[in-house]
Each structure stands twice: as structure tokens, then as C-alpha cells.
Amino acid sequence: MNHLHRRMGTFSLTMVGLGSIIGSGWLFGAWRAAQIAGPAAIISWIIGMIVILFIGLSYSELGSMFPEAGGMVKYTQYSHGSFLGFIAAWANWIAIVSVIPVEAVASVQYMSSWPWEWAKWTSSLVENGTLTLPGLGIASVLLLIYFLLNFWTVSLFSKANSLITIFKIVIPGLTIGSLLFAGFHSENFTSGEGIAPNGWASVLTAVATSGIVFAFNGFQSPINMAGEAKNPGRSIPLAVVGSILIATVIYILLQVAFIGAVDPSMTVHGWSHLNFNSPFADLAIALSINWLVIVLYADAFVSPSGTGITYTATTSRMIYGMEKNKYLPGVLGKLHPIYGVPRQAMFFNLAVSFIFLFLFRGWGVLAEIISVATLISYITGPVTAMTLRRTGKEFYRPLRLKGLSIIAPLGFIFASLTLYWARWPLTGQVLFIIMMGLPIYFYYQAKLKWKGFQKNFLAGLWMVTYLLCMIVISYLGSKKFGGINVIPYGWDMLIITCLSLVFYVWAVKSGFKTEYLKEATKVNEEMRLRERTIESQLDKEKAV
């Protein structure tokens, strides 16, 4: 009985999701999206929501079947074995570990425009959207703070999270209200070259690169915390869909407020010339809403740091999970005997965060890389959910999605299109980072004497072929998406849609009854027993 009371209900899981979705994305997303797509950025958010909802739904079925910590790293391994499992886990880990430095960068970028006399020195922290050496220094200190907060305890984190999340929702709300009230220029939506000044292709690119996919990435958190859920079958889908929808409303209102608050004289030369180091604070200064300026500068530390701290916790759990899957050295799977925290994994992630921080020194660049890596890791979700309907028929499914046979292929197509919209050469660079993980996989296979290698490799071969095809199409694709224009605009998206369907069918057919299903069955059974216990207890209470 004692383990029931400390589990998370639908509300707190939704809060975890919302808390992860509203990180630095809200502080910069509206500005980046407006820069790329102009006023039509509002449409970009809606497209982004649809893409993520379709993917999130597939993952909800998986999360409620296997409620375990860091589940996102394991599902694909259950359906397709270790090779595809590794690629998905690697892409997911890259996407999530790079969030830690991006949040630190966000705080420093906001700090660099502090308007007070005593804070003149902060203006030297950022130059043209990239951090200078002093800026990198402060961001490094923030990384160490996130690290130390997770180093001793997890309970500290969970206490702080709900409080930080409420703060995160209230402040965007205040920002929306005061910007709409203080200076709203409705002509911004239609003046100049109309609603989509950079063409409709830019509206699609904004979905992939302005930080929209990046912002919604937090929908994974309730799924990764599924092991803590009271009633996973009900609360996971509600928390996932709920947090995506609430966040969408907040983000669209922020986008409207942002576009309306920009001084029309600033967009005379086009939206792409909008240059802000700290977008909402700069607008509040221009409109002289002084109290909001102070609130925003405070929030620029609280919001990103909250997310940075959350992700420091989740990534160490992911590395711990990848070691358990035999993809990484054993030392990374050790838990601290007193604090129960995987400390070696935390040190490893800290080192990787520093590499990302020093290589890509601006919020925009990092958000782009995260978005593309995220999309690659998402592609496996719909495939896994559908495959397990065939290879894991006997599993207990607290949530059995109606229409999954339509939702899953659509999710796959949407993710592929969004990946393409990210534009060449970015698509190629990130796919290269993903391929860099393969030698690690082969090294550990060699240590296991290539046991069962062929079967696992063939089950994941579609993914390697898919990634190579995406690189080629992205390079040959239309000029509007950075390609060399061999495949004209329009046809490029048609080709990707048809190819995605082919790869989707191949992917679902590649799945087989893997050896990892034993472990999956154990997790599934434990959850079933837990639900029965809860039901019988509720029945007893009713009887009384």
C-alpha cells in the first residue's frame, strides 16, 4: 500500500510535461519563428502541434504499456532489437543532452541586455547572437549549478518542479497580457509583403528550425516518468495530449503578442532583420513596461534553469538505461549507494554538455540541432507502436489507441516532412552526428562476439537506408529548403510522402519477436498487477 501514495497523478504528470515544454522555447521561439516566417509564424505553431500530437499519441500507447523510467530509450529495442534500438536511443540522447547547454545559453543571452547602469558589463557577454568568452564562462557556471543540484538528491528536484512550473505559466501569461495592452500594432500582421513575407516554404522551415519542435520536445517527460504514474493507462495520454494543447495555446498567444508589439518601423526591411538578444525583454523596454522587464529577466533564469535541472536528471537516467541495454561502458550504470543517483553518467553528460556549449555558442544554432536530432528519434515511435501490435499481441494495453493504423503512418510522414523542412546543410550535419554513434554500437557488438548481430542489423537496416535517402533528397531538393533545386518545390514533398510510406511499411515488417520482449513482459505484468491492486482497493473503499 505504501507505494501508492507517492505516485504521480494526471495533474502532476501534466505539470511535468508543461514544465518541460515551457523552457527557453518561450523566451526565444516567437522571435525566431517571426524572423523566419513573419506573421505566418502563428500557422507554424499549429503545424508543429499537429506533427507532435501524432507522434505523442503513438508514444502514449507505448508509455502506458511499459511504464518505466527512461522508457523512450527502450521501446524500439523491444520491437526491432539492439541495432535500431541503439540508433533511436543515441538520437534521443543527443537531442536531450544538448538541451542542458541551450538552457544555460538562453539565460546568458537574456542577461546580456540588462539595461541598468551597474550592469553595463553584461553587454559584452553576447556578440551577434553568439556567446563571447565571458558569456561562455557564465554559461559554464550555470551548467555546474544544474549538475550539483542533481548530484545529491532527486527529492529536491521534485519539490522545486511544481513551483517552477506555476511560475513558468504565470509569467508568459503576464507577458501576453501586458504586450497586447501596451502596444498592439494590428497592421504588423498584413503590412509589407502580407502575412507570409518570406513565402509559405518559410512557414514550414520555421516548424523545424525556429525552436517549435524544440519547444514541444518536453512532451516526452511524462512518458519518461511513466514509472511513477498512479494509473498509467489514463494519466499518460491525458498528460501528453493535455500538456501539448495547453502549451500550444500559450505559444500562439505569445506569438500574436510578439508580432503585435514589434514597432512597425523595425520591420520595414523585412522580418528577417529583427535582431534581439533577449526578445521579450527588449520589447518590454521599448514599450517602457518596467515591471515586466524585471520579471522577464528573473524568469530568464528560472524558466531555462528549471528545464536545465530537469534534463540533467532525465539524461543521467537515459545513459543509465543505455548502459543497461549494453550500449555503453558498465561504469556508467552504477547508482550511488546513498543518493540513488547515477553519478558517473552525470559526469559523462556534463562533459558532453560542455562540448556542445563551446561548439555551438548561440541559442538559435543549438535549437536547430536539437530539433533535427529529436525528429530522427521520433520516427521510430509510430513504427514501434504498430510493430508491437503484431509481435506483442499478448501485452496488456491500458490504452489501446483507436485508429493507430492511420495515426502511426501519418506521424511517420509528418516527422519525415519536418525533417526535410529543416533545410540542407543542417539536415546533413545532424544526420552525420547520428551516424557518429555507430562505431560505439559495433565496438560493443564485437565484445559480445556478434551474437545475434545479423538479425538485429537487418531489422534496423531500413533506418540507415532511410537516413541516407533523406540526406540525398535534402541535397537535391528545392532551393526553398536549401537544396540544389534538382527536385522542384512541391515535388520534393510529394516524393518524401511516398518514400515515407514505403519506409514505414518496410520498418513495421522488419520488427520481430526480439529477446528483449522478456524484459518488456516483466514490466507489463508488474503494471497489470499494480492496476488490479488499485482497483480492488477502490472496490473495498466503495463497499465500506
Image (tube, rainbow, N blue to C red):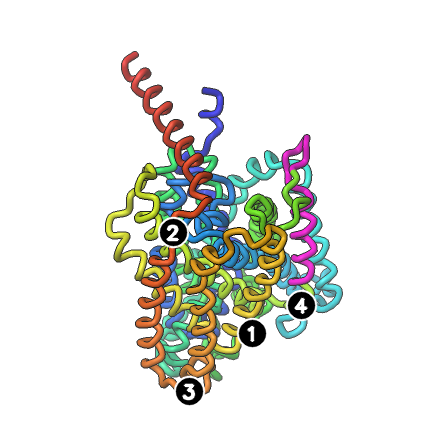
Q: Is residue 102 above or below residue 264?
A: above
Name the residue that disc number 1 marks.
275
Numbered label tally? 4
Quarter residue 294 falls in: bottom right
Between marks 1 and 3, how big is the CA–CA gap?
Answer: 29 Å
Tell me the number on the disc at residue 485. 3
- Report the side of 242 relative to 93 (left or right): left
Residue toward you, 208 or 18: 208
Element marked by disc 4: helix
Between marks 4 and 1, how big is the CA–CA gap?
Answer: 22 Å
Residue toward you, 242 or 381: 381
Give the mark nearest the N terminus, 3 or 4.
4
Name the residue that disc number 4 marks.
359
Q: Is residue 340 above or below residue 483?
A: above
Element marked by disc 3: loop
x, y percent for residue 312 = 61, 48
Name the residue that disc number 2 marks.
512
